[in-house]
Amino acid sequence: MIKEIMIATDGSETSERAAKVGIEIARRSGGRVTVVYVVDVFRLAHLPGYTAFPGLKDKLMELMQKEGREATADVERQALETGISCQKIVAEGDPGDELLRISGEAGIDLLIMGSVGRTGLDRFLLGSVAEKVVRRSTVPVLLVPGGGL
């Protein structure tokens, strides 16, 4: 039985669709939701001027943490409106690695995520995070495609 459902979000439209699917599965199975946003700290290091401007790193981290809190709060609100228990996690690190780690440690029965996220190049491929998770996950992964459901 699917009781522990993890929804990965990055605030994109595709992850919003994934959240709706995850919440509906939780409603039908009597399960709970854990929503996870991962601040991609490694992507920051590749930004031009990242280390050259004092305070830029801290400001960018603050903005990304805020985005994570907002994205997880949105999913939590949807879950609670449906009567589903929801835990929020904003983590830092490599998104694929963190999603795999959290899903393993939390005893997740199903991990749900969008097939592509917010980055431009990933739109041409399956999505580097989604691909990594699908290839390495020890729990079932449900990818929700972009576009209408």
Image (cartoon, grey):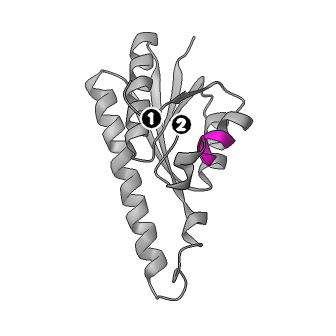
Q: Is residue 145 above or below residue 10?
A: above
- On the image, the x and y values in percent for residue 62 come to 40, 67
- In the image, residue 130 lies in the stretch drawn in magenta: yes
Q: Which mark is residue 127?
A: none
Between 148 and 2, the one nearer to me in the picture = 148
**What is the span of residues highlighted in magenta in the rendered image?**
126-132
Using the numbered discs, state the Cα–Cα distance from disc 1 to disc 2 in whole angstroms: 7 Å
How many residues crowd around disc 1 within 10 Å: few (fewer than 14), some, or many (20 or more)?
some
**Residue identified by numbered label 1:** 146
- Lateral position of residue 134 relative to residue 13, left or right: right
* In the displayed structure image, the side of residue 5 where residue 60 appears, left or right: left
Residue drawn at point x = 60 percent, y = 28 percent: 108
> In percent of the image, x 65 and y 40: which residue is there?
131
* Amino acid on which disc 1 is placed: Gly
The residue depicted at 50 percent of the width and 54 percent of the height is 119
The answer to if 120 sits in the magenta stretch is no
Element carrying mark 2:
loop
Q: Quadrant of the C terminus?
A: top left
Q: Position of residue 139 (x, y in %)?
A: 67, 27
* SS for callout 1: loop
